[in-house]
């Protein structure tokens, strides 16, 4: 799970201005870490369908944020995709 320190580091790395905590790039970074955690969980617990549904919802949310970021800030999109090795 995301602990406070890891979350703080991700926000520091992807923020766009000093008080930024909710921009698209920060949200994508946080969602990606949660998706990685849930993917590992599902490798152990194959029949946990409630978690699987939550994971699919997170993936959909990240996909929508990525398409928004690509439309609004293509350089930021490229940086995020390269950082997390998406697509």
Image (cartoon, rainbow, N blue to C red):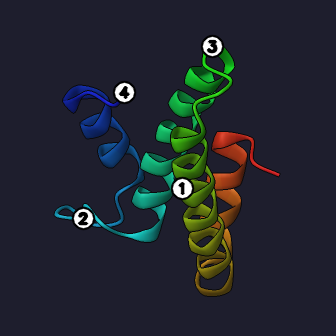
Marks 1 and 4, how far apart at CA: 14 Å
Task: Classify 10 Å Cα crowding around label 2: few (below 14), some (14-19), many (20 and above).
Answer: few
Instruction: Answer whether labels 1 and 4 touch (C-beta < 8 Å).
Output: no
Question: Which label sits on residue 20?
Answer: 2
Locate residue 51 relative to residue 3 in the image: left or right: right
Task: Choose the circle earlier in sequence order: 1 or 3.
Answer: 3
What separation in Å lies between label 3 and label 4 (alpha carbons)? 15 Å
Question: Closer to the N terminus: mark 2 or mark 4?
Answer: 4
Indicate which label's residue lies in the foreground, 1 or 2.
1
Q: Which mark is residue 58?
A: 1
Q: Position of residue 49 (x, y in %)?
A: 60, 39
Residue wearing tag 3: 44
Structural distance between the alpha carbons of marks 1 and 2: 21 Å
In the depicted view, which residue is nearer to us: 29 or 59?
59
Q: In the image, is residue 7 above or below residue 56?
A: above
The residue depicted at 52 percent of the width and 43 percent of the height is 50
Disc 4 marks which residue?
A: 1
How packed mark 4 is, by other alpha carbons closer than 10 Å (few <14, some 14-19, many 20 or more), is few
Residue contact at pointers 1 and 3, CB within 8 angstroms? no
Single out the mark in the foreground, 3 or 2: 3
């Amino acid at each position: 799970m995301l602990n406070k320190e890891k979350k703080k580091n991700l926000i520091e790395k992807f923020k766009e201005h000093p008080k930024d905590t909710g921009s698209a790039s920060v949200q994508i970074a946080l969602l990606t870490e949660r998706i990685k955690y849930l993917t590992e969980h599902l490798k152990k617990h194959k029949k946990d369908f409630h978690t699987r549904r939550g994971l699919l919802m997170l993936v959909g949310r990240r996909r929508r944020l990525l398409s928004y970021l690509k439309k609004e800030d293509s350089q930021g999109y490229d940086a995020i995709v390269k950082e997390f090795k998406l697509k």
